[in-house]
Image: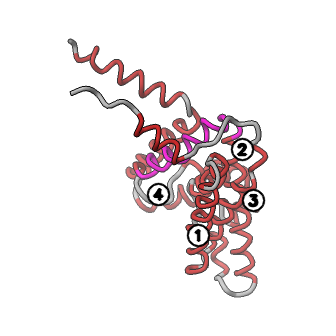
Amino acid sequence: MAIGARLRPGAHAVWAYIRRAPGTFIWLAILLVTTVVARILPDHVLNEVLGNRSTNLHHLEEDPVRVLVTSAFWLAGGPWVSYLVLYNIFHVPAERWLGTLRWLVVCVIAHVGATYLSEGVLYWAIQHDDAPASAVNTLDVGVSYALAGVVGVLVYRIATPWRYLYAFGVVVFFLVPVLANQTFTDVGHLTAALLGFACYPLTLGRPGVWDPVAAVRSLRRRPQPAE
């Protein structure tokens, strides 16, 4: 059998997987491009590029729409592959479950809401001399607020009582850094997750819930291939 014929079923399976969450994979493709660009650019040029797209207090006052959009297409840190894994764990099931439009609304609510609240906390800190005035230009780009929001909204995809364990784990995961570090980005992540919880109305009418125990049992009941 030709190599092309052997690869064709796998290619069809990959394409079928991707097209069920088009928004997620378009986003990942853009992030891959910007990550490659970031690797190529000299450090001083990259700092300028990211600085112009930062959702800091200065830019949120002057040109909020531009930076809120462009900041979501650059990674603040970590390899692109790690986001590929996280997007497949959280964004893909969320988009398939909610549909692309509702999933996108959750992402926007979490990204915009957490950005403004966290920067508001930073502004309060500056006003009370707990942060330097130069913090108005703090670099703040990335996709983590939208990701945290999707992590939060997925609580409604899980059957009870596992839903409550998942919700508890999400709160602890995002609350501990706030208590330990008290940075505005940690506040932003917690806010984004809570905004994901608040997106419950967007989950109404969506098909079914996922029961992890039932899923494991169904895997065990699958017939084993004959030797």
**From where the camera sits, is residue 53 visible?**
no
**From where the camera sits, is residue 137 visible?**
yes
Q: Local crowd at mark 4 within 10 Å, few (<14), some, or many (≥20)?
A: few
Dot 1 falls on a residue whose secondary structure is helix
Q: Name which quarter of the figure residue 137 lies in.
A: bottom right
Where 224 sits versus 137, above or below? Answer: above
> Do the residues under discs 3 and 4 have CB atoms within 8 angstroms?
no
Residue type marked 3: Glu
Give residue 207's position: percent from left, percent from top: 68, 35
Q: Name which quarter of the figure residue 93 lies in.
A: top right
What residue does disc 1 label? 172
> Do the residues under discs 1 and 2 have CB atoms within 8 angstroms?
no
> What is the CA distance from the residue labelled 1 to the residue labelled 2?
25 Å
Q: Which residues are magenta?
A: 82-102
What residue does disc 4 label? 45
What residue does disc 3 label? 62
Mark positioned earlier in the residue sequence (3 or 2): 3
Q: Local crowd at mark 3 within 10 Å, few (<14), some, or many (≥20)?
A: few
Mark positioned earlier in the residue sequence (1 or 2): 2
Residue type marked 1: Val
